């Protein structure tokens, strides 16, 4: 009897109160994407982003490098030195030898998904503890910064 | 044993009944039905369906809530300083609070209206009024910040504001207190009210593209108290309606002396006609002084300009400009139906709600159906303009809003309820209690041509026992009602800041897509911006020290400064180099008599600091920005006046010791 009454109580409770249901829609733009789901098709050579192939000439494009230095000064230099010394993030010396142009430009323009997926970036995050901010660098700026990096690496 | 079992059964039955009962409405103090929770529940991480822009009353600010959840999303500083955001304390924002009286740190924001085109919200701006030192503010809905504030001359207490015409051609402001005009000697006996005091109505034009306000003209009207106002729309576009009280023109104990007459007036203003008179040069130029303040998102700086002239149209001399409509009794709200055909006067001391018809008003004007004149302005016959009266609606009607089904909703302060009635047949359809003493109410889109008609919010004047007590001062409150069905249903209480008066509810989709995420560093034209750490520096100009500083996760540049002396004024111009959403940096310095700075990505803000003690003074980031936020700090060395310590600054290098010792 006690049992019946007990389950009856539960039933009525459920019936009377129902469960609240939300009828609102999900936010349309979400910055962070699931980490594990797409990890398998992540290309650690190219990174993730819109750059699949970047034309790089054997010689340095001075005009591009000069524009790239301006972007570096305003948006990157607070955290990255042009030497191999770590500031907030790693120093840039030799970065173009360690990574492909596509990887660098994808990371510069699309940092958050790559921080979540790239094993090298995740190892670096354990050292720096600061996620590289999205500095909203345009495609052209990214290309110019890459040229500035090449010029920096060409220096002896 | 048997007895025990019986008790058990009895107890279970009692429990069951009690539980069952708990989900049902019990009495008037708990008039909430079981599905209310589901209706207002917005799951974690989900967005609300509507923005609710709410006046902050005596806080002087505007608050933004999400509906139906009632979650507070933001408090926008408008007329009062806000040390949390540096508003009124940063060098850039100080000019926003400038007036002809100098900088005023507080005001009383009563009403909010959203900009509109064709009688529909366009999602661009929100306007707010300053009820104490008369001003109108425009808030930019891409940044949710105050973009412009204009002061009103010839006014004292801007209450019937900031109401807008249907295409935001004008935002109006009617003076609550009549006063002698600014260009007259105001040093007169108060009991010369009838001769010397005037009521002024201001029409501020709003530029289509950038929203820039200009005081286009003022109308000088008789010395009454102007209370609220609304623009005609649709058929009545071109007219503006103002409620008035104290047509007795009393100057003391208004509680009694302004409640003598059975009817006061609604003033109908033909603003299209005013434009014609203005064009024809019928306005008189008057010497005045008022401040006009604008904030630039490019220089990240406000500028304040004192203006010295206004054009005034005289309601007495210029025919067909103004008409009085008698309205019982001390009307407070004056509200125009979605089609613009009807306007409702809520006589706060009256026993009926009069509903006027625009068409009948036009007929009466044409037929010169006047019962006389007041101060040169024709008074129309009440019965000739009246469409009908809502009989015995309740006690103390204040404001009316509308839904999309031809119904009106009127708030009743004294009887503490909202009454739903039909505009056509004026029959009362439903009434619900409010807790307690409702003032304003708002329906989603309720002042547009196409109200949404889903939600109504009541803004109450008294909270009493609705929340956990917090000493003598209690939170103010809003109550959300579902009005989609035949019966209004209360579904939520939520506390508000300051005292909420009028508010607006707009669909989230209209506004959220335009929300700015950060300021572009490239576009920053601030005079003292440091765009990159290599441009940071410290410069002395006599007794002024200017620090061109940057912040990025997780350091300031420079973070060591020496050579500041007692007697100096130090200006920290901090540029936030971040270029991503939701990464503000803060800046605080020990002993600052101002406030903190809260600097949005790409923005430059300046804190003035006048050191008054010799020693080492810390600076730090106040907004938790990263894992190394606690490391985001620095030092300023303050030396005595006349000290020889050179001005130096650095980041990342410990300077060699000045005495040469290692």
Image (cartoon, rainbow, N blue to C red):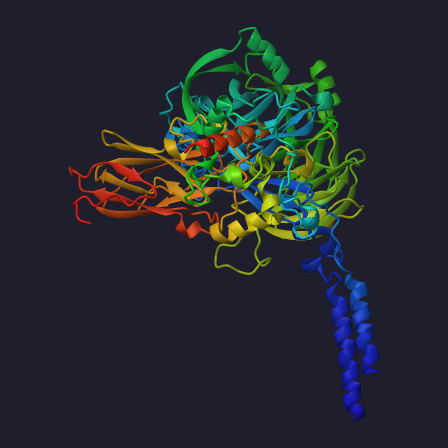
Reply above or below: B542 against B311: below
Image position of B237 with respect to B633: above or below:
above
One can see residue A138 in this view: yes
Judging depth in this view, the residue of B258 and B213 nearest the camera is: B213
Q: Residue at x 58, y 45 (%)?
A: B73
Q: How far from the left and from the top, in percent, is residue B344?
A: 69, 32
Q: Quadrant of residue B444?
A: top right
Tell which of B150 and B237 is nearer to you. B150
* Residue B133 visible from this viewpoint: no
The image quadrant that residue B424 belongs to is top right
Image x and y of residue A1, in percent: 84, 83
Query: Could you tell me which quadrant the C terminus of chain A lies in?
Result: top left
Residue sitting nearer the eye, A58 or B43? A58
Total tally of numbered discs in the picture = 0
Above-or-below relation of A122 to A71: below
Left or right, B185 with reference to B524: left
Pinpoint residue B238: horizontal percent, then vertical percent.
Answer: 66, 19
Residue B422 x/y as whole percent: 78, 38
Q: Is residue B470 left or right of residue B353?
A: left
Q: Please state if A79 lies on the left or on the right of A43 as rendered.
A: left
**Residue at 75% from the left image edge and 27% from the top image edge:** B339
Q: Nearer the viewer, residue B35 or B407?
A: B35
């Amino acid at each position: 009897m006690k049992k019946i009454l007990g389950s009856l109580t539960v039933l009525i409770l459920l019936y009377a109160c129902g469960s609240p249901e939300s009828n609102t829609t999900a936010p349309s733009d979400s910055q962070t994407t699931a980490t594990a789901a797409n990890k398998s098709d992540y290309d650690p050579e190219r990174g993730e982003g819109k750059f699949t192939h970047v034309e790089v000439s054997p010689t340095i494009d001075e005009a591009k490098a000069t524009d790239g230095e301006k972007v570096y000064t305003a948006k990157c230099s607070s955290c990255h030195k042009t030497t191999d010394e770590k500031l907030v993030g790693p120093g840039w010396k030799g970065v173009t030898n360690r990574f492909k142009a596509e990887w660098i430009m994808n990371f510069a323009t699309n940092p958050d998904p790559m921080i979540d997926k790239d094993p090298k970036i995740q190892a670096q995050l354990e050292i720096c503890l600061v996620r590289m901010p999205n500095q909203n660098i345009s495609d052209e700026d990214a290309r110019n910064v890459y040229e500035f990096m090449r010029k920096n690496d060409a220096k002896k | 044993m048997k007895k025990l079992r019986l008790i058990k059964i009895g107890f279970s039955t009692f429990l069951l009944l009690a539980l069952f009962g708990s989900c049902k409405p019990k009495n008037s103090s708990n008039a909430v039905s079981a599905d209310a929770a589901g209706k207002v529940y917005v799951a974690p991480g989900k967005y609300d369906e509507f923005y609710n822009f709410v006046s902050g009353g005596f806080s002087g600010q505007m608050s933004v809530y999400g509906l139906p959840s009632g979650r507070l999303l933001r408090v926008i500083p408008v007329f009062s300083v806000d040390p949390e955001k540096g508003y009124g304390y940063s060098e850039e924002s100080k000019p926003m609070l400038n007036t002809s009286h100098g900088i005023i740190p507080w005001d009383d924001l009563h009403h909010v209206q959203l900009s509109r085109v064709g009688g529909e919200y366009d999602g661009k701006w929100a306007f707010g009024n300053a009820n104490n030192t008369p001003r109108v503010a425009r808030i930019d809905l891409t940044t949710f910040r105050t973009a412009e504030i204009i002061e009103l001359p010839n006014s004292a207490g801007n209450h019937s504001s900031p109401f807008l015409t249907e295409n935001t051609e004008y935002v109006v402001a009617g003076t609550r207190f009549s006063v002698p005009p600014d260009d007259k000697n105001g040093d007169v006996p108060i009991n010369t009210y009838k001769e010397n005091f005037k009521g002024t109505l201001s029409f501020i034009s709003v530029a289509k593209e950038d929203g820039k306000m200009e005081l286009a003209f003022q109308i000088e009207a008789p010395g009454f108290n102007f209370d609220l106002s609304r623009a005609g729309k649709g058929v009545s576009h071109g007219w503006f309606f103002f409620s008035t009280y104290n047509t007795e023109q009393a100057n003391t104990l208004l509680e009694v002396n302004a409640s003598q007459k059975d009817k006061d007036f609604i003033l109908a203003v033909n603003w299209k006609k005013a434009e014609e008179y203005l064009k024809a040069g019928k306005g008189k130029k008057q010497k005045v002084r008022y401040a006009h303040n604008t904030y630039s998102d490019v220089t990240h700086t406000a500028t304040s300009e004192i203006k010295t002239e206004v054009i005034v149209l005289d309601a007495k001399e210029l025919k067909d400009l103004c008409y009085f409509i008698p309205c019982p009794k001390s009307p407070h709200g004056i509200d125009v139906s979605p089609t613009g055909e009807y306007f409702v006067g809520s006589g706060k001391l009256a026993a009926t709600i009069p509903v006027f018809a625009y068409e009948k008003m036009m007929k009466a004007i044409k037929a010169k159906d006047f019962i006389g004149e007041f101060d040169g302005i024709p008074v129309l016959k009440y019965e000739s303009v009246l469409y009908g009266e809502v009989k015995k609606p309740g006690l103390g009607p204040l404001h009316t809003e509308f839904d999309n089904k031809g119904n009106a909703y009127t708030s009743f302060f004294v009887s503490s309820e909202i009454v739903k009635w039909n505009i056509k047949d004026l029959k009362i359809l439903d009434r619900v209690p409010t807790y307690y003493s409702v003032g304003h109410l708002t329906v989603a889109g309720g002042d547009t041509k196409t109200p949404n008609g889903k939600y109504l919010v009541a803004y109450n004047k008294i909270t009493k026992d609705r929340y956990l007590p917090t000493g003598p001062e209690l939170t103010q409150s809003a109550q959300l009602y579902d009005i989609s069905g035949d019966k209004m249903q209360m579904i939520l209480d939520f506390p508000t800041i300051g005292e909420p008066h009028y508010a607006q509810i707009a669909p989230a989709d209209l506004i959220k897509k335009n929300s700015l995420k950060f300021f572009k560093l490239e576009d920053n034209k601030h005079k003292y911006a440091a765009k990159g750490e290599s441009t940071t520096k410290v410069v002395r100009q006599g007794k002024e020290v200017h620090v061109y500083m940057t912040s990025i996760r997780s350091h300031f540049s420079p973070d060591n400064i020496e050579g500041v002396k007692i007697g100096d004024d130090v200006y920290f111009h901090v540029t936030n180099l971040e270029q991503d959403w939701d990464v503000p940096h803060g800046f605080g310095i020990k002993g600052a008599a101002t406030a903190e700075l809260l600097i949005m990505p790409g923005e430059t803000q300046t804190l003035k600091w006048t050191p008054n003690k010799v020693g080492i003074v810390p600076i730090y980031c106040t907004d938790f920005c990263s894992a190394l936020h606690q490391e985001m700090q620095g030092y300023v060395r303050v030396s005595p006046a006349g000290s020889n310590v050179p001005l130096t600054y650095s980041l990342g290098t410990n300077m060699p010791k000045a005495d040469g010792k290692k």
